[in-house]
Structures are given as C-alpha cells and as structure tokens.
Amino acid sequence: MDHNLRCFGTTPKTHFLLSLSLLLFIIFFFSFANAAFDLATIPFDDGYSPLFGDSNVVRSSDGNGVRLLLDRFTGSGFISSSMHKYGFFSANIKLPSNYTAGICVAFYTSNGDVFEKSHDELDFEFLGNIAGKPWRFQTNLYGNGSTHRGREERYRLWFDPTKQYHRYSILWTAKNVIFYIDEVPIREVLRSEEMGAEYPSKPMSLYATIWDASNWATSGGKYKVNYKYAPFVTEYKDLVLKGCSVDPIQEISGMEVCSDQHAELEAQDYAAVTPLRRLAMRRFRQRYMYYSYCYDTLRYPVPPPECVIIPSEKQRFKETGRLKFGGSHRRHSRRRGRTTTPVDDTDQGDM
C-alpha cells in the first residue's frame, strides 16, 4: 500500500480512485519515456567469454544469450572480449525467483584487473531478498580508484524482474553517464571539472556475475543464501556492446581512431535525457529511490561536486541519505572476493 494513502481517511472507493489515478500517472510517464532504442545486438561468443565458473555459464541454443548459475560450489560470470573507451552496454536480463537472499547479480563495467589502484567502475547490482519481498538494487560509480567516495544509490523496481526480461543499460560518454531500465533513465551523472579524475575515463570491460554475497547483500547479512533453492539462475539475452575497442596500454595512440565512434555514440538517441525522459526519471526517483549518497551528510558534509540537490527530494531523506520512514545504509564492496562491510536494509515494507 502506498504510504501517502495511509495519511488520509479514505473510503474504499476513494482509495481505489486514488490508486487508479496513480497507476495511470505512472503509465503516462513511462509510456512517453519507453520509445524503444534502435539497438544492434551481437551473439554471445562475438563479444564475450566466460570469466569464472565455466560450467555454470550456459549459452543459449541460438547463441544470442547466456544463463549464469550459482550453486553451492561456485557462482559464474562473463566478461567482454575487449575493453572500451566509452560505450553503451546493455542486455535483457531476467533475475532468479523465489528465495534469493544473499545473492548478488551484477552487470557492470570496470578496469580493476588492469588498473588495480586507480580503477574505474559503473555498476548495476541486484541484491536478492527473502521470498515474497521485492528485489532491491543499486547503481554506483567509481573513478580513478576513488573508493573513499562511494556514489551509491539504492532503489526498488516497479515490476517483478523475475517474471520476464527487462533491459538494463549503461551509457558512458566523455560528457555523462546514464543508467537505464527499459529505456527509462533512472540516474544521470554529468561530468564536471570539479570531479577531475574521479569521473571514469579509462577503458573498461563489461562484466556480468552472480555470486554468494551472504555477508552483506540482504538486510546487512541477516539472511544468507539457502542452497536448497539452488541452482539460482539469471538469464541474459539481446546483448549490446557499442563503443570503441581500445588497448589500455596503447590508449593514447588509439584516441584518433576512436574520435568518430565517440561522436557517433554521443549522437545516439539514448545519449541524452529528453524532457519527457527527465520527467519519468524524476518520477522513478521520487517513488523508488530509498538511499542516495548525495543526501548522506554524515558521510559527505559537503556533497560531491556532481550532486544536484533537489529541495523536494532532500526533504524526504534523513542526514544518512535514507528515507525518513526507515532503512539504513553502510558502505560495502561490490566485487567478488573483496572484504565487505555489512549493509543493513531494514526498510522491507512498501514505499
């Protein structure tokens, strides 16, 4: 139930009309933002290879998709065959269903294997949940090894991501980063001079993984992976990998070759947030974002330079960046094998 409705003494009829109006409002915004992008997909083997858990990386019969499995022995993942200097990374993804506590499904770009102390990263991370509760997820951005500046935002989805495929996309240019779900922008980070090297700018690979994150993923580690429900399966298809392939060691000499591809990328429909998409993004963030580092004044008394503080948005959050009705957030690591700090998401109710 929507918390706003609990504040009014509504009759069942009024409650129904308000709910219907809200539904129509959401449909209105997302229908305008949902004009399909013109995307060229590639077969899995043309752009990717297994990263770990090879036996749990199962290609589809048509070669256009892949299933990643997590069982009690191993998780799994894949990586793009090339690194890219800017690009559009996208896939239709279906997440595991039923009891998924402790699971982390990640779709992200990174160069941590090449630049260990100065890596860049852009993340979608889906955090499982107990049966009957919605999947939570977060986006994150790191630049030049700036792990002391976590740029996490956390959200709920407006649909069940386990029932059918939905498209998740990361747009990365020299000017901006946009995270999309089904052509709806949910977050944009604009490059500014103040960000300096903390804006991701080195070539990155695309990664997709599923792994056991029992120590932090669900309610700060309260709920663990239960392997009686294994194997846990996440499915990827209609993969998109658009960008200029770059050798990170020869990056400078390759920039002239990439200039035309950079210009083409920035000219694409998805490279800018139109006014109608911005309305949809604002609506999504109003209803489904429950943590933002920009409003976490305990961590950042002065908001990081890319933050755009929206007064109406700020009013909804505590000084911890959490929604005022509940929940909490602590920093954690996102990559397999790192030491992690528990995250406590106690706001398991509806928003």
Image (cartoon, rainbow, N blue to C red):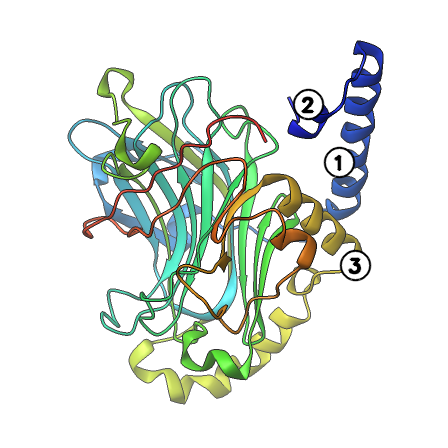
Query: Residue 161: horizontal and vertical position, in percent?
Result: 52, 30
Residue lying at 26% horizontally and 34% vertically, measured from the top left: 221
* Disc 1 residue type (three-letter): Ile
Q: How many C-alpha atoms fall within 10 Å of the one at disc 1: few (<14), some, or many (≥20)?
A: some
Name the residue carrying label 2: 6
**Residue lying at 44% horizontally and 60% vertically, measured from the top left:** 151
> What mark, if any, has residue 26 been given in the picture?
1
Position of the C terminus, as image quadrant, is top right
Which residue corresponds to mark 3?
275
Which of the two discs, 3 and 1, labels the residue nearer the N terminus?
1
The x and y percentages for residue 281 are 68, 50
Callout 3 environment at 10 Å: few (<14), some (14 to 19), or many (20+)? few
Mark 2 closeness class: few <14, some 14–19, many ≥20 residues within 10 Å: few
Going 46% across and 28% down the picture, which residue do you hit?
A: 348
Q: CA distance from mark 1 to mark 2?
A: 20 Å
Q: Amino acid at mark 2?
A: Arg
Instruction: Please tell me whether mark 2 sits on a helix, a strand or a loop.
Output: helix
- At 59% from the left and 53% from the top, the residue drawn is 40
* Distance between the alpha carbons at the discs numbered 3 and 1: 16 Å
Residue at the top extreme of this rendering: 12
